[in-house]
Image (cartoon, rainbow, N blue to C red):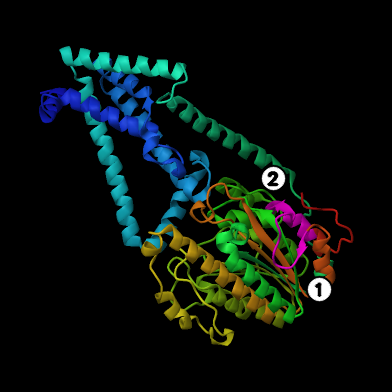
Amino acid sequence: MTDEKADRKRLGSMGPVFGSAFVAVFAWFAFTLPDHPDAVRWTSFLRVPIEVPLILFALVAGGQRLGGLLRYLVTLVVFVVLGLKLADIATQAAFQRPFNPHLDAKMLADGWILASGTIGAVVAAAVVAGVVLAISGAGFLFLRSARAAASAQGRVSIGLMMVSAALFIGGGVLVATGQRGAEARVTGYLGARLSLIVTSMADMRAFEAELAQGLEPRSGEGLFSAVKGKDVIVIFVESYGRSALDDPRYAKVTGPRLDAVEQALASAGLKAASAWVTSPTVGGLSWLAHGTLLSGLWVNNQARYDLVTRSGPQSLNRLFGDAGWTTVAAMPAITMDWPEAAYFGYDLTLAAADLGYRGKPFNWVTMPDQYTLSAFERLGRAPAQAAGRPVMAEVALISSHAPWTPVARLIDWDAVGDGTVFNEQAERGDPPSVVWADPERIRRHYIGTINYALEVLGSYMQRHGDNTVFVILGDHQPAAIVTGPGASRAVPFHVVSGDTDLVNAFKARGFVSGMRPGALTAEWPMNEMRAVLIEVFGGASRPEIRGP
């Protein structure tokens, strides 16, 4: 018995009809599925892709003459379109951009790390296994159905061909006359994705040429005279975006908090100046923002980051090292090998294991921000000070990283110890599965973690701001579920110091006084801030670099 006859026996006498119907419905779903989460609604599927009857006509007309080639080709097209659209929905929800096959494949490992840390490795593995099984099962059933459709004979074959031809011609007429309800988008969709890949490859070649030209300065010797002898601490605050300050849902929390931070700074003789910078990423991939600020290059994807960390210009950290500072990194989110650290030129890297936290994690967040800063003071800053050298440090604060639960709270700094004091905080509050079942609860938890991070920073700078310059900025905006669609990609950028002349030099370049940049405050691309910092820290007497 041939394979086709066996399939017909399994599917019954209505095998070709059932197979054709399944192919048509599945392809219709794949071709009408929107590629953005905000567009997914039932009305989106009230269209007739004219590619569907074309596929049916080809399968039935081809019959057994074309064998498996046509069936596999149709299956490949349908599942590629479906896979790309599902990937688009995911990347649009997380990063507010379409999926790029050329650049985003490496994000699968990062997605696994986040998912396993948020819902647990077992549950994450079960989800992945379920997805793989569902896709495999759907692919198998689609192939079986396509084979059944191709096996149609006699009147069934003629009937299916006539129906397919009528739908195709009718849909074509509707498309040609501009009528709604019919569409022919698949070719354009796949063509646009291919064009994106080609454009990305060309962009990478141009970026490689930019890297080859180099970027000044090539050495830090003689730089940074305006901050000579001072510690310079660059602090990235996770998901601290412009929406946290501008969005009315969050401003009622962050406004009073930033005012309280200013009061704490003033009590310690510190002043602040603030502006906006545009992040190269949104919703995640924080290391792209780190690489952008510290390299002076626009690092907006993983491929660029890999190139920069292999052969990029001198990082801001390394320039400070050349000029006599001890360079330190405090990175509580780094839990595996980090070969890229060699590019940045740290004298001391304090990853999660090196920070000595003995408390329980806050879901994905390995330790609360207060512990990170306390451990940095003890393990990174104090030894350098004892050796008589200033510190240039890069610190990542991650308490405001998704899933934003539980929300930590500030305690007495002298009680921080090895972090076990935070165990009670780590165990309270709703689990991620509960928080993420309600968008409003997600937003409340998000701004709660931002409020905590700012409170910790204010208290920390008040205690440790003597002879220190703080550069504080967000790494990126949070996901669209927090900000809403079309939000700005800007993040706050603060400079805090007891040196009035230094703070005024930033104000002369477009910064505003205090911790609250306004609607009309200057905004720079994040990569340009490296040059601004080098210029101001070098004691430039006139504002040669200004915001747009």
Say which quarter of the image contains residue 285.
bottom right
Q: Residue 107's x, y, as percent?
A: 48, 50
Above/below status of 517 relative to 376: above
Image-based side of 283 in relation to 63, left or right: right
Q: Is residue 61 magenta?
A: no
Give the alpha-carbon distance from disc 1 to disc 2, as whole Å. Answer: 35 Å
Q: Which residues are magenta?
A: 511-534
Residue 173, percent from left and from top: 41, 15
Asked whether the residues under the numbered discs 1 and 2 touch, taking CB atoms below 8 Å apart as contact, a structural biologist would say no
Q: Amino acid at mark 1?
A: Asp
Q: Amino acid type of disc 2? A: Leu
Q: Residue at x 16, y 25 (%)?
A: 15
Residue 363 makes an appearance in the image: yes
Magenta stretch contains residue 525: yes
Residue 217 as seen in the image, left or right of residue 28: right
Image quadrant assignment for residue 183: top left
Q: Mark 1 vs mark 2: which is more N-terminal?
A: 2
Name the mark on residue 211: 2
Indicate the secondary structure of the residue bearing disc 1: loop
